[in-house]
Amino acid sequence: MVATCSSISAQEYSSECSFETVKSDTSCVLSVESEYNSPDSYSTDAASSEADESPSSNDDVLIPTNKIKRTFVDYKKIRLDLQEIEWENSLQQDTEASWELFKDILLSLELKHTKTYFSERPRTLPYMSPQLKKVINKKKKAWKKYKNCESAAHLEQYKKARNKLRNATRKATIRYEESIALEAKTNPKKKGDYENFLASLLINGDARSSSIAVRAFNIEVASIRDSISQTQLGLMRLQFWKDLIDDAFVGRPSAQPVGMEIWRALQRHQLSKRYFRRIIEAREDNMKDKSFNDIQSAEDYAEKSVSSILYLTLEALDVKNVNADHAASHIGKAQGLVSMIRGIPINAKHGVVNLPLELLANHKVSQSSVLRGTSDQGLKDLIFDLASQAHHHLTHAKSLAHSVPEEAKVALLPAVSVHQHLERIRLIDFDVYNPKLQNRPHWLAAKLWWHKMRNKY
């Protein structure tokens, strides 16, 4: 915000927090990087005018300075101290108690290895750019001209400059929010969510930022299982995200980049807390038991972990429609089943088979043969059953298109990539170990755009 006559900078709090796990069997590190800025300097004119108006006895008046208070934390020493702790003996309690114990240990170490210093560097807003500075200067000049003569013409020029600045600031803020969500994972293309990321880019307005924030949140919780050596550590990290969501919904934004974007999305839209909780709970259940009893349990998992994201996207678009929710449910289940099929070779390399046990028994497929990468007829028949069920859900979702509101269809664009994957699975004769299965659909970006232009999914 820019003051009308003299620029007065406000107190700034800026922080970044990243959650990372050290790849060690006995250590888990929560890395918190924070930066606290004290009140920045007022402009010379503003400071002098306030000094003239203030009483002669001003011992209790806070005098603004151009110094910024910052904190420095030695995370190398914290990591070394954490690695010396016997975590297996310390974390024998339930998840919440273990998480509280870990936070207490981390806080004590952070206080131990934290130093405070002052910097002369002036404050800069994170979304400030040279173009935005030019708009600010034009607005200041327009204000000065109006103050000199106070004519109606100059007032009109000032209002135009002010409105232009508001629009430019809003756009710059949106761009910054999007970059924060994207930087939460340095390159979402490498994290397996590239197709959904492309679909999110076609959403207009504030809903796009909220959708990307939800996708980034899902990437964070989904990647936990593959980055831990002990289940208890994974459950603690999921507890961290539970606390983050709880804080965001009561108006306490997290310094963690994705958490900050979730809080901002809540300021713009009425998102349901239960969908965030369902995403976390689905990952929690999958972490405790990595296998599914039957195809119904696999669909339930997809409903919680994938369909919930689509529900949140619809809410970001301010869509409240039963048919849209129904279509989103089927698309989420189809996408979840397709992801299960495509993930078979990758999971096999890590010694994991997450195929429904009932289907394995019906088609007489052993888990050891899946781990060896043997694609026999039994496994192909199993994949055929999964793909057929996914195709059934996708067909059902498309049959609802005539009753889904036009503004909701952009949220359902992930159905395009699901359809292309199912078609590729059919063309390779349901051989999940065929390298072509891992290739991204051809011309996906163009097809997504084409479907959006035609109001289809």
Image (tube, rainbow, N blue to C red):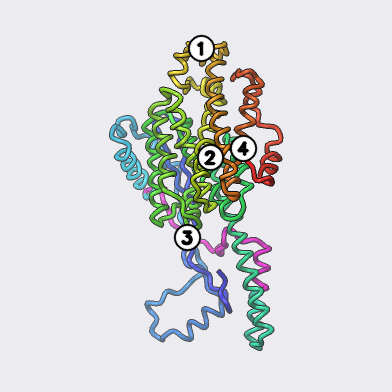
Sequence order check: which comes first, mark 1 or mark 4?
4
Can you tell which mark lies on residue 195? 4
Q: Which residue is mark 1?
A: 369
Which kind of residue does numbered mark 3 sit on? Tyr
- Disc 2 crowd, CA 10 A, few/some/many (<14, 14-19, 20+): many
Can you tell which mark lies on residue 13? 3
Q: CA separation, marks 3 and 2? A: 42 Å
- The answer to whether the residues at label 2 and label 4 have Cβ atoms under 8 Å apart is no
Towards the viewer: 405 or 143? 405
- Establish if 112 lies above or below 397: below
What percent of the width, then of the height, locates residue 308?
47, 41
Q: Would residue 132 be found to the left or right of residue 251 on screen?
A: right
What percent of the width, then of the height, locates residue 431?
61, 18
Q: Which residue is mark 2?
A: 327
Q: CA separation, marks 2 and 4? A: 19 Å
Which kind of residue does numbered mark 2 sit on? Ala
Residue 10 visible in the picture = yes
The mark lying in front, picked from 3 and 4, is: 4
Q: Would residue 402 be found to the left or right of residue 246 on screen?
A: right
Towards the viewer: 158 or 50? 158
The mark lying in front, picked from 1 and 3, is: 1
Sequence order check: which comes first, mark 2 or mark 4?
4
Numbered range of the magenta stretch: 112-138
Q: Secondary structure at mark 4?
A: helix
Q: Quadrant of the C terminus?
A: top right
Sequence order check: which comes first, mark 1 or mark 3?
3
Q: Secondary structure at mark 2?
A: helix
Q: Secondary structure at mark 1?
A: helix
Sequence order check: which comes first, mark 3 or mark 2?
3
Check residue 189 for magenta coloring. no
Which kind of residue does numbered mark 1 sit on? Ser
| Residue 167 occupies quadrant | bottom right
